[in-house]
Image (spheres, rainbow, N blue to C red):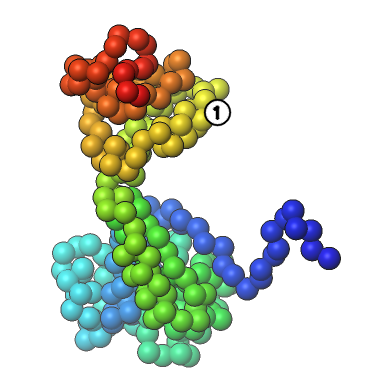
Amino acid sequence: MADPKYPEVQGGGSLILAWQIRNKRVLVVGGGEVAAGRILNVLNADAKVTVVSPREGLNPEVAYRIEKGQVDYVDRKFEPSDLDGVDMVLTAVDDPEASTQIWKLCKEKRIAANIADVPPECDFYFGSVHRDGPLQIMVSTNGKGPRLANIVRRQIAANLPPRLGDAITKVGKLRQKLRKVAPGPEEGPKRMAWMIKVSDTYSLDDFCEMDDEDMEALLGFYGPDEVPRLECLRAMRGELAAFDGSFGFCVGC
């Protein structure tokens, strides 16, 4: 009998991760429409991309990436030596037999691979992604309904607050500044707890409106572990008349 104190295991899912592939070498086999989408995905993650495909099979977008030098290009069909030094492989070719052969070679070399439109031959799936600056939200159907994932993603995006990406950017900048103020590893728990207070106190609009002077003023309250509201912070900078002179507080806060 299940214990209600603990969540039940629901098998059949995927482990959804934010995979950091910056400066990793990604091989894309194929140059059609599907390959174009895959290439953009990994370029957005700052990967180093090599495309292997005969020139006559190139999609206009893939041809553009090649022309602009955004990817390395090999004008021929795949050869096993293309896997040398590769960290990830994405195939998007209309040849099931060739795709399966590439998959087997990747397994021998322990290279993570995604074989387009063949879920059993994928170490990972591409979901439908909403992007707003640093914010990324992925919807995955675990390879069962990619079109439905796109529909769900659009519905989620339509209900998100405006300027959410801007707010997250400001939070990231504040965290970087905080690490300079309190760089020691022993400060880790306090940094985390203080940032939680800040995130709970400030609204998304507050973060969007925050400038560098606001951040520097706010960081002055890290030591005493205080988090004044934004209007109080600005009052202490002389922008509002509500400040009553007490440390960390102002009239109306």
Does residue 45 lie above or below 27 as drawn? above
Residue placed at 47% from the left, 28% from the top? 194
Q: Nearer the viewer, residue 148 or 36?
A: 148
Does residue 70 lie above or below 236 as drawn? below
Does residue 242 lie above or below 229 as drawn? above
Q: Nearer the viewer, residue 79 or 64?
A: 64
**Label 1 secondary element:** helix
Looking at the image, can residue 188 be seen?
no
- Asked which quadrant contains residue 167, the reply is top left
- Residue 40, given in percent of the width and then of the height, sits at 29, 66
Residue placed at 25% from the left, 33% from the top? 210
- Residue 8, given in percent of the width and then of the height, sits at 70, 63
Quadrant of the rendering where the N terminus is positioned? bottom right
- Left or right, 18 with respect to 15, comes to left
- Asked which quadrant contains residue 108, the reply is bottom right
Classify mark 1: residues with Cα within 10 Å, few (<14), some (14-19) or many (20+).
few
Residue placed at 24% from the left, 18% from the top? 242
Please identify the residue farthest to the right as the structure is shown.
Answer: 1
Residue placed at 26% from the left, 64% from the top? 71
Please identify the residue farthest to the front as the structure is shown.
Answer: 252
- Left or right, 76 with respect to 108, comes to left
- Residue 247, given in percent of the width and then of the height, sits at 37, 11
Provide the residue designation for mark 1. 189
Q: Nearer the viewer, residue 57 or 233?
A: 233
- The kind of residue on which mark 1 rests is Pro
Disc tally is 1
Please identify the residue farthest to the top as the structure is shown.
Answer: 245
- Residue 88, given in percent of the width and then of the height, sits at 45, 65
Quadrant of the rendering where the C terminus is positioned? top left
Q: Nearer the viewer, residue 132 or 73?
A: 132
Looking at the image, can residue 201 be seen?
yes
